[in-house]
């Protein structure tokens, strides 16, 4: 399938009931995660100790004490700034770096194009460009995708939006290819989690409080113990899911990551076709 056909084909396959804004799942609003945030806030960082263990002194300017950011616009601005700085340092010093990402979809895809001049859509486009450029200069990406399209539907995304977002992700995967430094696996387990990722062993970044199609809070930390614990757990999980994805590709005759993403989204929608008159056509 040609990359330009992903969005169009997805749009044809998605159920027509997604044209309206009816929510298929009613999610209860949970107050700001005071309990989970306290876990991080109580563990204040000593910047001198952080740098003592941090082997990449080139990234000293990026080190953060525990930092909670509120507001979707501020969250996006800081993320874009961090990505830009990480890219600049990686390229200037010709470093081998790794970004680990566990999330629902990915900053490698967006609903928006350059014609949308609003701040948040523009920042999403810059984030996507930074990520692609990082991959192109050799930064290794290890990405775990949950592809929770049902959560997307319950949050108000319609048929067109889902087809555009997933199609754009497939296009990006085709663009970067199944290269040795761009590694994507799919987590099909019925687990729900919010985005969390690490910039090598420099920064840990969490996004929280999803409302109105954007995350409106984020948390940053350079706590080396927390980062190394997450990276270690992530890599074990990644290897396990990578093995499962290889088996899936062999069983279904799938040749690319883009096709695996499409097949997974298609299967998830079929699984939930009985919800509230949800018909798959």
Image (spheres, helix red, strand yellow):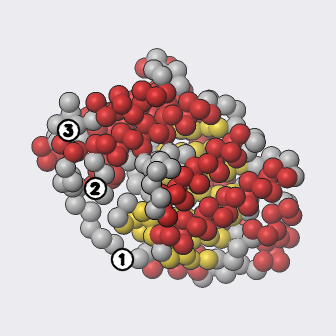
Q: Residues within 10 Å of mark 3 (few under 14, many from 20)?
A: some
Query: Earlier along the polypeptide chain: callout 2 or callout 3?
Result: 3
| Quarter containing the C terminus | top left
Question: Which residue carries the number 3 mark?
Answer: 16
Can you say whether 62 is above or below 45 in the image? above
Q: Residue at x 36, y 66 (%)?
A: 211
Can you say whether 151 is above or below 280 in the image? below
**Residue 170 shows in this picture:** yes
Question: Which residue carries the number 1 mark?
Answer: 31
Q: CA distance from mark 2 to mark 3?
A: 14 Å
Secondary structure state at the residue bearing disc 2: loop
Position of residue 6 measured from the top left corner of the image (x, y, whole percent):
42, 30
Position of residue 268 measured from the top left corner of the image (x, y, whole percent):
32, 38
Q: Residues within 10 Å of mark 1 (few under 14, many from 20)?
A: few
- Name the side, left or right, on which 134 lies relative to 36: right
Position of residue 269 measured from the top left corner of the image (x, y, whole percent):
28, 38
**Residue 106 shows in this picture:** no
Question: Which residue carries the number 2 mark?
Answer: 156
Can you say whether 167 is above or below 198 in the image? above
Front residue (pair 187, 156): 156
Query: Earlier along the polypeptide chain: callout 1 or callout 3?
Result: 3
């Amino acid at each position: 399938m040609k990359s330009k056909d992903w969005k169009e084909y997805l749009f044809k396959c998605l159920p027509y009931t997604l044209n309206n804004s009816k929510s298929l799942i009613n999610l209860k609003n949970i107050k700001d995660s005071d309990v989970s945030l306290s876990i991080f806030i109580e563990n204040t960082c000593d910047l001198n100790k952080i740098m003592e263990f941090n082997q990449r002194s080139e990234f000293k300017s990026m080190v953060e004490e525990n930092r909670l950011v509120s507001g979707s616009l501020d969250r996006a601005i800081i993320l874009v700034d961090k990505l830009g700085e990480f890219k600049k340092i990686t390229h200037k010093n010709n470093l081998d770096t790794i970004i680990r990402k566990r999330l629902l979809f990915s900053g490698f895809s967006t609903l928006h194009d350059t014609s949308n001049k609003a701040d948040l859509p523009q920042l999403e486009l810059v984030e996507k460009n930074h990520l692609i450029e990082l991959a192109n200069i050799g930064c290794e990406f290890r990405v775990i995708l949950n592809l929770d399209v049902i959560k997307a539907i319950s949050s108000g995304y319609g048929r067109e939006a889902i087809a555009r977002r997933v199609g754009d992700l497939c296009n990006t995967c085709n663009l970067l290819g199944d290269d040795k430094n761009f590694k994507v696996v799919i987590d099909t387990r019925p687990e729900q989690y919010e985005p969390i990722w690490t910039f090598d062993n420099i920064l840990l970044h969490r996004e929280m409080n999803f409302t109105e199609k954007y995350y409106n809070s984020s948390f940053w930390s350079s706590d080396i113990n927390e980062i190394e614990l997450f990276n270690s757990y992530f890599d074990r999980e990644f290897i396990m899911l990578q093995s499962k994805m290889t088996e899936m590709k062999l069983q279904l005759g799938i040749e690319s990551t883009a096709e695996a993403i499409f097949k997974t989204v298609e299967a998830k929608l079929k699984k939930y076709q009985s919800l509230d008159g949800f018909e798959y056509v």
